[in-house]
Each structure stands twice: as C-alpha cells, then as structure tokens.
Image: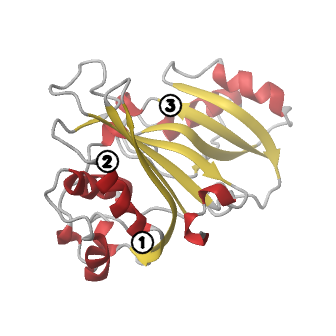
Amino acid sequence: MTRYKMTMAYDGHLFHGFQVQPDQRTVQGVVEDVLKRMTKGKYVKVEGSGRTDAGVHAMGQVIHFDYPQREIPAERMLPALNSQMPTDIIFTNCEIVDDDFHVRYSAKGKWYRYRCSLDHFVNPFKRFYTGHFPYPLDVAKMQKAASDLIGTHDFTSFAASGGSIEDKVRTIYYVNIQEDKANNEIIFDFIGSGFLYNMVRILVAMLLEIGNGRRPVDDIPRVIAAKNRLEVQGTAHASGLYLYHVFYEDVPAKYRLDLQ
C-alpha cells in the first residue's frame, strides 16, 4: 500500500461534519466513496487531522489514506480525486509519505480562524460563512484579554460536554484579533498544540462578551482556574469557524507568543 497525505478545503455548510455518520453527508464519507470507486469496490479508510462539526469549514484540513492498488504519483492523485469531488470540496496538495506518518498524531499544532460579522442584520450572503454579533465591540480589550490565554493551561472551562478526551491541558501559542473594516467583520486567529471539542467557539463567545463589556477584561485567569464549563455558557455559531492550517513542523517562532 501507498500512504498519501493530502491537504483539502471544503465548504462545510452542506456537510454534517467531517466524520462518517449513518445516513448523513460527511466529508470523510464523500472522499471514501470516491476512493471506493477508484479501487473498484475496496474500502479505503480516510483519517483526518480534526473532526470538524456540522457547518464548520476548512481551508487547510489534512487527511491520509493507504491506497491498496499500484502507486499513483502524487501529481496524478491530486487531479484524479479533484475530478470526482463535489464542488464544495477541493484538494490543494498531495504527498506520498512514510507508513509511520499519521495525520493526527504527527501534527505539531493547529490554526483555527473565526470570522464574525458585525452587520446590524444577518447578511444573507454571509450567513453560512460567518458568525454574527451586531453589538458594540472594543477590539483592544479583546486582544488584551486574549493574552491571558497564551501558554499551557487546563482548558476544562472551555470544553463542551460530549467530548471524550479526559486530558484538558493544551498550549495556546498565538491569538490575534483584528477588525476587517472592508467586510465589517472581526477575525479571530488561534494557534495551539491542539483544541478541545468546541473550544475555539467557546473562546470566541467569551471574548465577544469581554469586547462588549459584559465580562471584565481580566476575567480569563479566573475562568481557567475554575475548571468549570458553566463559567462560559455561550458557544459561537459553527458557520464562522475555519480549520485554517495544520502544522507538521514546529510552529514557527513568529507564532510562538508563549516564548516571547
């Protein structure tokens, strides 16, 4: 068998998440169905770097699979798959990797981006691709508060119920919050060693509360120490979240605010 590592982008609006689920359209399911056709009926399991939820998008999702037939050069596998994908999925890169590479366990970090529209009313052309917060925000307050997230912490307070991982300790290397005035949006970027179930969306919800003055700017250390999900009950809408990039080399120094 030949192991392929592939980078992909997808519009998550019409998918019930990444992971295969019975009677639901999922990203993994679509790719596995195409591979089954290519191998004339053989099942090929697709592993993803992260299991994005329903409605969540990806610009840099990474998968791997073991192709059970003769090796196809990487430069030919890319168009072979893209030619059979629906229009809401595209592969952007393909590599042949060693058998010990694992798309999830070999990752050194992940970058998530969240887009939040500030339009007074929901924009019909954004509703599937941004969150929505039509209230005043102080971006400087949010960025100041976000600095308290940098470093290694137990993020129990930011993990949604339903997650199966018991160890809630993660390292956040980088958080940046900026206003995109041209599109009337706030852009949140988070880079870390890994993220818990719904963690990024819960972080965004809390930072929006801080920016709107509903929560004090210095509240994050207290919330982290509490290790209690009830401290942050909001969760930003899935439509604004993008898996932006997965790092397989060390996260670059320019994104390592934990070292600065």
Q: Nearer the viewer, mark 2 or mark 3?
A: 2
Dividing the picture into quarters, in which one does residue 123 lie? Answer: top left
Q: Amino acid at mark 2?
A: Val
- Check disc 1: other Cα within 10 Å, few if <14, some if 14-19, many if 20+: few
Q: Residue at x 38, y 23 (%)?
A: 182
The C terminus, quarter of image: bottom right
Q: Earlier in the sequence, mark 2 or mark 3?
A: 3
What's the CA distance linking mark 2 and mark 3?
29 Å
- Check disc 2: other Cα within 10 Å, few if <14, some if 14-19, many if 20+: some
Q: Earlier in the sequence, mark 3 or mark 1?
A: 3
Q: Earlier in the sequence, mark 2 or mark 1?
A: 2
Q: Nearer the viewer, mark 2 or mark 1?
A: 2
For the rendered model, the colour scheme is: secondary structure
Does residue 23 appear in this view? no
Q: Is residue 83 left or right of residue 182?
A: right
SS state under label 3: strand
SS state under label 2: helix
What's the CA distance linking mark 3 and mark 1?
26 Å
Q: Residue at x 49, y 44 (%)?
A: 243
121 up-or-down from 21: above or below: above
Dividing the picture into quarters, in which one does residue 160 lie? Answer: bottom left
Measured as percent of width and height from the top left, residue 21 is found at 39, 45
Measured as percent of width and height from the top left, residue 94 is found at 75, 36
Tag 2 residue: 139
Measured as percent of width and height from the top left, residue 9 is found at 55, 32
SS state under label 1: loop
Q: Amino acid at mark 1?
A: Ile
Q: Amino acid at mark 3?
A: Tyr
Tag 3 residue: 10
Tag 1 residue: 165
175 up-or-down from 151: above or below: above
Q: Nearer the viewer, residue 135 or 43?
A: 135
